[in-house]
């Protein structure tokens, strides 16, 4: 193998790794103990979409809000849950998105030997969070979130929409409710 | 392949060096929005949100220049301002300044230092964002949002530069706004503008 070809293969491998690294999403959730999720059938949205996100491009951004709500509704409908048209729902949904700047010290790459020039970097971490509040007790029953880098994502509407769909899908995978089961 | 290497490295370096000086401009649009139905605009209710910086809050110079630039820009895209009656579009803007951290890699990239000697140098800069919202006055729904982001250190101390920066930001933002029907009947439209 000629050395030049080896270098290009290495470059491609490195680029793939770098891109894959950017695409990681950290998903988490917690469940309030003693919550009886089996009774959940209907839900409603709470009207608190006006919270600051930490990114002026996303504050009061109706496109972002509508896409996120649509993704959640689609995911819940696939689980047999219905949006309450009238009367009291079983649970109330709140959502919030926050964008904060993070510093990546590059320590992990260094440890695994992925890089020689392991310098720190900064990135925007975007975290959509979904809260389920029990309508009877008015207490938080479940919270799920997905954190990923938003660098370049907000500036591209299609990319942002795909990211919202992916984040909501991954968050709802951790949601312990499926009607009829 | 080998000959390609150097130009690519030079181009990348140029990009990195100018990166902090470029203006980031982008927009979101309501899918399926039909801008051929819009002809007129008016300013919506004033922005109550703080800018996040006392140097920009209630600054009449800044507000006047943003409004002037937006009004000129919208006229150029084929929308006329109405002073009476119901407008088709409501316009709203918001300015924000937030502190951000950059890690200075220039020393390393330029070869001023090697390996551990470079250390980590963080630079705090102030990033300004100007957001422009275009709302359908009938449905009261957002149909378009554009923004421009740039560091603001220099322009807060220099009014000429602020004016230039505002004009640049608004012009580049509105290039992404779909044009109104009057834009395409340009001769009739310029006559209309001229008559104002």
Image: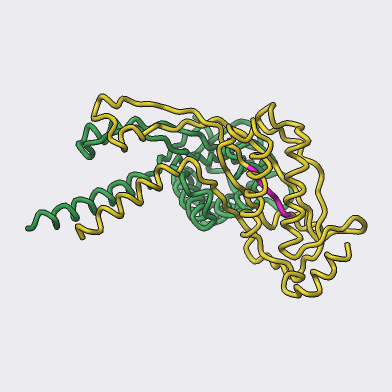
Chain colours: A green, B yellow
Percent position of residue A13, x then y: 23, 51
Residue in the image at 60% along x and 38% along y = B128
Is B118 located above or below residue B41 in the figure? Answer: above
Q: Which quadrant holds the N terminus of chain B?
A: bottom left
Judge left or right: residue A181 versus residue B59.
left
Write down the quadrant of residue B112 in the picture: top left
> Which SS type dominates the magenta stretch?
strand
Residue farthest to the right, as pictured = B84
Percent position of residue B160, x then y: 67, 39
Judge left or right: residue B36 versus residue B80.
left
Q: Which quadrant holds the C terminus of chain B?
A: bottom right
Percent position of residue A36, x then y: 54, 37
Residue farthest to the left, as pictured = A1
* Labels in figure, total: 0
Nearest the eye: B11 or B26: B11
Is B180 located above or below residue A165 in the figure? Answer: below
Q: Is residue A154 visible?
A: yes
Residue in the image at 53% along x and 51% along y = A155
Write down the quadrant of residue B77 in the picture: bottom right
Q: Is residue A83 visible?
A: no
Judge left or right: residue A178 versus residue B27.
left
Judge left or right: residue B22 versus residue B186.
left
Is B190 located above or below residue B29 in the figure? Answer: below
Percent position of residue A128, x then y: 53, 41
Nearest the eye: B35 or A108: B35
Q: Is residue A73 located in the magenta-colored stretch of the structure?
A: no
User: From which residue to which does the magenta span run?
Assistant: B130-134
Residue farthest to the front, as pictured = B160
């Amino acid at each position: 193998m000629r050395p030049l070809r080896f270098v290009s293969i290495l470059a491609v491998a490195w680029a793939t790794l770098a891109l894959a690294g950017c695409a990681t999403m950290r998903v988490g959730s917690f469940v309030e103990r003693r919550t009886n999720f089996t009774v959940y059938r209907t839900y409603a949205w709470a009207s608190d979409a006006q919270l600051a996100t930490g990114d002026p491009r996303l504050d009061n951004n109706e496109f972002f809000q509508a896409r996120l709500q649509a993704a959640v509704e689609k995911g819940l409908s696939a689980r047999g849950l219905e949006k309450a048209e009238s009367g009291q729902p079983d649970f109330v949904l709140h959502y919030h998105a926050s964008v904060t700047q993070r510093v990546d010290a590059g320590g992990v790459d260094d440890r695994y030997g992925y890089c020689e020039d392991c310098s720190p970097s900064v990135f925007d971490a975007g975290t959509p969070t979904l809260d389920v509040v029990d309508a009877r007790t008015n207490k938080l029953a479940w919270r799920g979130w997905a954190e990923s880098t938003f660098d370049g994502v907000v500036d591209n509407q299609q990319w942002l929409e795909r990211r919202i769909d992916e984040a909501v899908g991954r968050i709802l995978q951790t949601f312990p409710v499926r009607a009829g089961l | 392949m080998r000959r390609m290497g150097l130009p690519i490295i030079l181009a990348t370096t140029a990009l990195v060096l100018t990166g902090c000086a470029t203006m980031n401009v982008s927009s979101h649009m309501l899918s399926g929005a039909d801008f051929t139905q819009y002809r007129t605009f008016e300013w919506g209710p004033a922005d109550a949100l703080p800018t996040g910086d006392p140097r920009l809050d209630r600054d009449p110079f800044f507000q006047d220049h943003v409004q002037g630039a937006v009004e000129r820009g919208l006229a150029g895209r084929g929308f006329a301002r109405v002073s009476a009656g119901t407008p088709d579009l409501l316009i709203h803007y918001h300015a924000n300044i937030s502190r951000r951290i950059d890690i200075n890699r220039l020393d390393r990239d330029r070869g001023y230092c090697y390996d551990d000697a470079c250390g980590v140098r963080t630079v705090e800069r102030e990033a300004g964002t100007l957001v422009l919202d275009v709302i359908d006055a009938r449905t009261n729904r957002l149909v378009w949002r554009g923004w421009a982001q740039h560091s603001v250190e220099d322009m807060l101390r220099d009014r000429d530069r602020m004016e230039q920066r505002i004009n640049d930001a608004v012009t580049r933002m509105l290039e992404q706004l779909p044009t109104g029907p009057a834009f395409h009947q340009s001769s009739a439209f310029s006559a209309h503008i001229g008559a104002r």
